[in-house]
Image (cartoon, coloured by chain):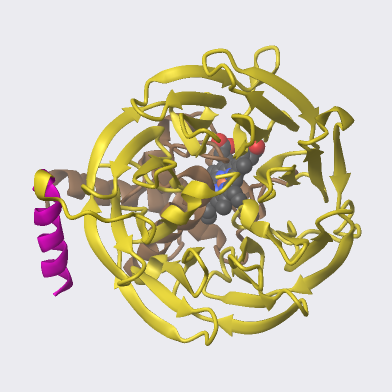
Amino acid sequence: MQLFFSGLLAVLLSACSGMPLRGTGDLGLVVERASSHVTLVNTSSREAYARIGGLGDLSHASVVYSRDARYAFIFGRDGGLTKVDLLEARIVKRIMQSGNAIGGSISQDGRIVVAQNYTPGGIKAFDAETLELLSEVPAEYAPGSFSKVVGLADVPGNKFAYALFDGGEIWVSDFSDSKRPVTKRYPAGLQPYDGLVTPDGRYYLAGLFGEDGIALLDLWQPEQGSRKILEKYGRGEEKLPVFKMPHLRGWSVAAGRAWLPAIGRHEVLIADAASWKETGRVAVKGQPVFVMASPDGRQVWVNFAFPDNGWVQVIDTLTGKIVQTLQPGKAVLHMEFTPRGEAVWLSARDDNRVVIYDTKTFRNLGSLAADAPSGIFFTSRAARIGF
Amino acid sequence: MSSSRFLYALTAILLGSLAMPGMAELTAARQKELVHLVRQDCGSCHGMTLRGGLGPALLPATLADKPAEGLVATIIGGRPGTPMPPWHRFLAEDEAQWIVERLMAGFPE
């Protein structure tokens, strides 16, 4: 039945002139990490409607959307950058932009897509329309030394903030002139592993792997420089091994506080999002990977690194207590809330399934088959700062 | 059995017996689990195709000059000060050895 539906839709969609008019606000895609495919999904009908292949190595692939939320830009591990049309369910353009990439972001005005690369370390800016290279900023933090780039986030003013894993710095590149970006550098600390910008675009945070703490830059007053928050959260205790690096994004802010994964501790750290002082922590099942607030900020969902990646826990942001512990499937890699958060989709890689939960009742609403699913990306990201 | 598979199996047996005299062969089921672990969970840092990510590439060409014992020790004990974690809770020494041999020969799918 589902197959018939997607077949029908494909036929309808490919008959271009006769394409049914529809918006994309309830569409999205699921990355199938091992098979170079993405599955296009509809979050209203909770169904897959098309599948697109030939996308290269999609381990750690991430996706951003054009500002009209029609096109997905998929950044593959192998440096592939693919523009996919969600309505026509086809690849519009595909380029190989580097040897080893980790993600990307799109500018405030929607005209520039930027990829962040491990090798060669740096960022590259492309025309969102044509995927033509506009400019690049090599992450050369010392003469001849290039850094892996992590935590790329779009910030207001057609700027992008990112962190240098090897260089220990935060860089902010201004693409007002997209062919001649201007970059400012700030100290971060030892081994920043990812970064995020708060939903209002004001603060950039870089999580540190090599030391306890998070580097913070106030983008409204960058002249004040960066500083460190949540310093020494490990209290000098020995770190637990980290079998997978946590991921940070703007979804970490909820109920006036930031909810952040600790490194090497089975804890979520809570900081006041104005003073940036620690206000508490929550003990959880394992090393947190995604600490993700629901769109209304009432809940924070947490998944975990190997070997605890079969668990998901839900924190109530009012009480700071865990209200639910779930086992959605084997190897839960990612979660994504529907635009207003009545449901959350989770990928269970080793069960080859995407599982959907009701966020109010925690009832399982169903599942979709997918081949080793990893990232799930809905078009609601198109309108968010920092994505 | 195709000739390449035969050769592969032969190499595996030879390597196994050279490196681990008297050590029991890993069961086929365990080998399958290890392949999955390396591709998926080591892959989160080294890339699913092992061409590198936050961690370096683990391809025959990049590992060729490195002594196998050192690589086994890295897997078992991790590398303090870097994101490479110790895997001794999940991997026995002979299993890490098996992984290193497979990595150096070209890792199975």
Q: Is residue A224 above or below residue A26?
A: above
Report the magenta residues as a range.
Answer: A1-16
Q: Farthest residue toward the front?
A: A21
On screen, residue A4 versus residue A340, left or right, reads left
Q: Position of residue A303 (x, y in %)?
A: 58, 68
Magenta stretch mostly in which secondary structure?
A: helix
Report the side of A269 relative to B82 (left or right): right
Q: Is residue B60 magenta?
A: no
Q: Where residue A163 appears, x then y in whole percent?
A: 68, 35
> Which of the pair B105/A387 is nearer the observer?
A387
Does residue A269 appear in this view? Answer: yes
Q: Is residue B26 visible?
A: no
- Above or below A306: residue A19: above
Residue A286 image point, x, y percent: 66, 70
Q: How many numbered marks are there? A: 0
Q: Is residue A197 above or below residue A267?
A: above
Q: Nearer the viewer, residue A338 or A170?
A: A338
* Image quadrant where residue A294 sits: bottom right
In what quadrant of the picture does the N terminus of chain A appear? bottom left
Q: Residue at x 46, y 29 (%)?
A: A111
User: Residue A202, image x and y in percent?
Assistant: 74, 43
User: In which quadrant of the rendered view does residue A3 lie?
Assistant: bottom left
Residue at 54 percent of width and 69 percent of height:
A309
Tint of chain B = brown
**Viewer-proximal residue, A17 or B56?**
A17
Q: Which chain is yellow?
A: A
Q: Quadrant of residue A329?
A: bottom left
Quadrant of the image for the C terminus of chain A?
A: top right
